[in-house]
C-alpha cells in the first residue's frame, strides 16, 4: 500500500481514554499488521505518514484532550510531518458532524463500530482468522479482555449508549480462545471489562451468563488471576459470587459502580436500585466472598489497614530505584500499587512474589519480599 509519493505506508495509532479503547486499538493494530502494514502504537518517532487517533468523549477533560491531540496532528499534517490523519472512537461517534465542520483538515472520521470501514480506508481487509488474536501494547503479563460492547442501561447522566450503542455480548468461545492465546504469550492476569459486565449473555444466550464465562476462563491453563470490572449493581447475578468464592484464580475483587447512596437521587439517575437494595447486595457480596475488595466511585479504601500482612504481589514494572506491583485487590491504574526497593531486592517483571506490607503512603503500599 502506498500513499502519495514513494514513501511506504507506516501507521501510528494514538489511544486516548479507557481500557476499552485500548483493546479496540490493539485489535486495529493486530488487523493492520496481519495485512502486512507497518503499524505502531503510540510511536515516539515522527516517521509515520498516517496517524489514527482513537478518541474519548466521556467527560470534559477527556474530550479536550482528544481535541487537542487531533489539532496537534492536524498541525503536523500542515507541516508535512504526516500525510493523513484519521479519527475514530467515542468523541468521533458522538460529535462527528460538529467536528467535521470545526476541523475540516482531518481526512476521515469513524465511529466506535466502524472497524471494517476504517480498515478499508487503509487498504486493509478484516481478517476473520485473526479473531481471538491480539497484539498487546502493555506488558504481556496482564491483558484486558473485553467481553461485550455497548450498554442498554437508561442512566440519565451517561452518554455511553450514544457513543457505544446497544449491548452486544462477545461469544464465549471467542473469549476462551482469546484467553488461551494470551496465556500462550505469557499473560497471567485477565482483566474483564465491558460497559456492563453483569449484563453479559442476555442478548445471545437469553440469560445472564457471566458466571459460566468466569468458570470457563478460570479453566484456561496459565491464567493465575482473573479480575472483574464494571459490574452493574441492579440485577447483579448472585451466582457470580459463588464462582468467585470457588475458584482460587479469580481475584476476590469486584469493581461495582454504586454511584450514589440516596434512594431519591438513584431514582433520578435511573439506576434501577435503592439504597436499601444496595446495602443488601453489599452484605450478600461480603457474606459469599469474605475478604473481598469492593471498588466503587463512592468508597475510599484505607491501605494503612494492610500494614503487617503478607500478600501475593504481581510485579508490573521497574521504575527508578523501585519495583511496582499489585495485590489481588488492586487493578492496574485504578487502584494503589505496592512499592518494593529494587536496590535491596532482585525481582522480575511479570513474576509473583509474596510480600509483607511494611508501610503506606497517601496512595500506595510499601513492602518487602518474604523469602
Image (tube, helix red, strand yellow):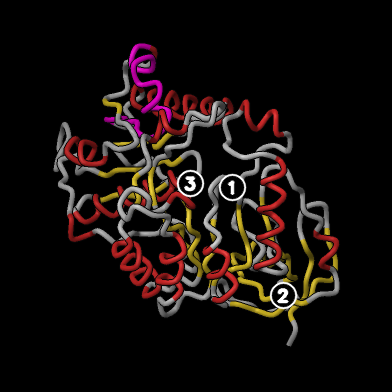
Q: Earlier in the sequence, mark 1 or mark 3?
A: 3
Q: Which residue is mark 2?
A: 311
Closer to the eye: label 3 or 2: 3
Residue 230 shows in the view:
no
Q: Is residue 266 above or below residue 336?
A: above
- Disc 2 to disc 1, C-alpha distance: 28 Å
In the shown orientation, is residue 215 left or right of residue 105? right
Residue 340, horizontal then vertical, whole percent: 73, 70
Q: Earlier in the sequence, mark 2 or mark 1?
A: 1
Which residue extends farthest top? 101
Closer to the eye: label 2 or 1: 1
Q: Residue at x 68, y 46 (%)?
A: 278
Where does the magenta region start and end?
83-101
Q: Which residue is mark 3?
A: 196
Q: Is residue 84 magenta?
A: yes
Dot 2 and dot 1 residues touching (CB under 8 Å) = no
Query: 279 or 33: which is nearer to us?
Result: 279
Residue 84 placement: quadrant: top left
Query: 270 or 52: which is nearer to us?
Result: 270
Residue 86 shows in the view:
yes
Q: Which residue is mark 1?
A: 233
Q: Is residue 82 above or below residue 183?
A: above
Amino acid at each position: 500500500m502506498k500513499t502519495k509519493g514513494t514513501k511506504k505506508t507506516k501507521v501510528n495509532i494514538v489511544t486516548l481514554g479507557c481500557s476499552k479503547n485500548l483493546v479496540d486499538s490493539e485489535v486495529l493494530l493486530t488487523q493492520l499488521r496481519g495485512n502486512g502494514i507497518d503499524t505502531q502504537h503510540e510511536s515516539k518517532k515522527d516517521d509515520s505518514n498516517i496517524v489514527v487517533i482513537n478518541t474519548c468523549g466521556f467527560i470534559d477533560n477527556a474530550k479536550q484532550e482528544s481535541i487537542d491531540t487531533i489539532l496537534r496532528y492536524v498541525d503536523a499534517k500542515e507541516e508535512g510531518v504526516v500525510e493523513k490523519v484519521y479519527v475514530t472512537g467515542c468523541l468521533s461517534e458522538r460529535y462527528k458532524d460538529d467536528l467535521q465542520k470545526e476541523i475540516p483538515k482531518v481526512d476521515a472520521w469513524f465511529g466506535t463500530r466502524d472497524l471494517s470501514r476504517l480498515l478499508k480506508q487503509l487498504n486493509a481487509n478484516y481478517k476473520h482468522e485473526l479473531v481471538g488474536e491480539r497484539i498487546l501494547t502493555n506488558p504481556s503479563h496482564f491483558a484486558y479482555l473485553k467481553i461485550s460492547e455497548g450498554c442498554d442501561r437508561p442512566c440519565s447522566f451517561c452518554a455511553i449508549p450514544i457513543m457505544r450503542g446497544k449491548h452486544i455480548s462477545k461469544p464465549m468461545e471467542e473469549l476462551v480462545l482469546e484467553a488461551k492465546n494470551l496465556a500462550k504469550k505469557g499473560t497471567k492476569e485477565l482483566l474483564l471489562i465491558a460497559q456492563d459486565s453483569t449484563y453479559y449473555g442476555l442478548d445471545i444466550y437469553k440469560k445472564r451468563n457471566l458466571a459460566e464465562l468466569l468458570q470457563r476462563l478460570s479453566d484456561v491453563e496459565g491464567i493465575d488471576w482473573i479480575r472483574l470490572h464494571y459490574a452493574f449493581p441492579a440485577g447483579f447475578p448472585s451466582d457470580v459470587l459463588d464462582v468467585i468464592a470457588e475458584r482460587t484464580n479469580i481475584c476476590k475483587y469486584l469493581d461495582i459502580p454504586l454511584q450514589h447512596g440516596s434512594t431519591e437521587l438513584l431514582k433520578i439517575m435511573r439506576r434501577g436500585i435503592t439504597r436499601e437494595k444496595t446495602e443488601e447486595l453489599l452484605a450478600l457480596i461480603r457474606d459469599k466472598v469474605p475478604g473481598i475488595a469492593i471498588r466503587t466511585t463512592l468508597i475510599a479504601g484505607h491501605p494503612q489497614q494492610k500494614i503487617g500482612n503478607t500478600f501475593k504481589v504481581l510485579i508490573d514494572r521497574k521504575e527508578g530505584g523501585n519495583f511496582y506491583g499489585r495485590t489481588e485487590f488492586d487493578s492496574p491504574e485504578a487502584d494503589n500499587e505496592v512499592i518494593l526497593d529494587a536496590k535491596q531486592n532482585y525481582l522480575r517483571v511479570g513474576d509473583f512474589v509474596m510480600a509483607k506490607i511494611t508501610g503506606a503512603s497517601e496512595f500506595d503500599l510499601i513492602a518487602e519480599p518474604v523469602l
